[in-house]
Image (tube, rainbow, N blue to C red):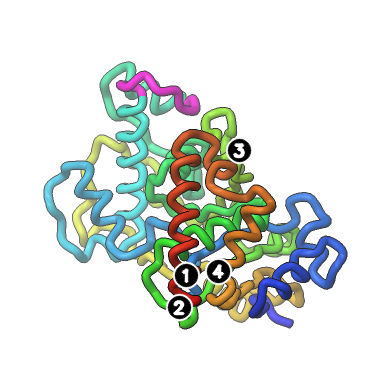
Amino acid sequence: MGVVTTIGIDTIEQLHEFLSPVGEYKDFFTQHERYLFRGEGSVHYPLNPSLFRGKTVQTLYRSLRKPPIDEAYFQYEETYQWVELQSLIKFFRLANNAGISVPHSEVLQSSVLHLHDTYAPQDEAWLPAELLDLFSLARHYSFPTRMIDWSDNIYTALYFACSSALNNDKDWSEDGLIVYALNLSNVRETNFPIRFVRPLHSFNENSKAQGGVLSYIETENLLKEKNISEELAPLEKLAPKRIAHKPLDQHLTEHFSEKETTQKELLHKIVINGEVIPKLYLYLDSLHYSAEKIYPDLYGVVRKMLQDEANWAKKEEKEI
């Protein structure tokens, strides 16, 4: 037993047994919201938020149309926080200009109405509590943030893993799917600085259909008392804290070996053999976990049709 454990599944029959609410892993399903699940289309995809992948933060910075800055800036946590905040303000303003309803933010609304930038986040922690609703809404529309998407439904996570694999050109026999199962109850009993947000479903039907929950690792607010109208500080004056691009499973392992101990299992990696994917897609479809359920609009209907074809093509390719 460890903080992070791995469960291997090689056949659709083993998966069916694993999903039984009265079987060996019944605790995954019998206690409401005890576990959160995330599916990935490859075992090689790390459990990282979108903001910490590749050069996403540099792309986000360029979208602000600011003057170019030294690449060294992107080693620092303060740069990330500044880019996150500036980008969220732009998101808020563009949505307002388009007449699109977003969660109320008194401080940002004031700056929009009065055409000035005077907001400085006062919270000791990052992300600021007053901006969580807006950050979580933006995340569900593919806005890059330090939040990781989860579902409270393992079938939804399996769908996302399978859907992602259908777009993956790798040989399924050499790769596989992975579903992460985070024990919410156990994590909350520790001092690990992870925080959870359930988005306001009234603003997003997709989040409602997917049982969406977001997590992020809380850190110190390095923008406290710094007005957003100001540009980034000179490189030599940035707070010395460097950004950590470690995936969540590595964060957990290091935290509970260096700062705290626990005998509880916190994160399961459920690794599914790639050969199972065509049957898994049909298995989920038979339970009505397909695109038109996960995306309850016409986009979901079209996505379902295309995924049906992609899965059939992969199935035929494998049989040949």
Q: Are marks 2 and 3 in contact (CB under 8 Å)?
A: no
Q: The C terminus appears in which quarter of the rendering?
A: bottom left
Mark 1–mark 2 distance (CA, rounded to whole Å): 6 Å
Q: Residue at x 27, y 24 (%)?
A: 116
Residue 28 drawn at (x, y percent): 76, 62
Q: Are marks 1 and 3 in contact (CB under 8 Å)?
A: no
Q: Type of residue at label 3? A: Lys
Indicate which disc residue 316 carries: 1
Mark 2–mark 3 distance (CA, rounded to whole Å): 40 Å
* 2 or 4: tag closer to the N-terminus: 4
Q: Quadrant of residue 5?
A: bottom right
Which one is in front in this view, the residue at disc 2 or the one at disc 4? 2
Q: Which region of the structure is painted magenta? A: 96-104
Q: The N terminus appears in which quarter of the rendering?
A: bottom right
Classify residue 198 as left or right of residue 305: right
Vertical position of residue 100 compared to residue 209: above or below: above
Mark 2–mark 4 distance (CA, rounded to whole Å): 16 Å
Classify residue 220 as left or right of residue 29: left
Which one is in front in this view, the residue at disc 4 or the one at disc 3? 4
Which one is in front in this view, the residue at disc 1 or the one at disc 3? 1
Q: Are marks 1 and 2 in contact (CB under 8 Å)?
A: yes
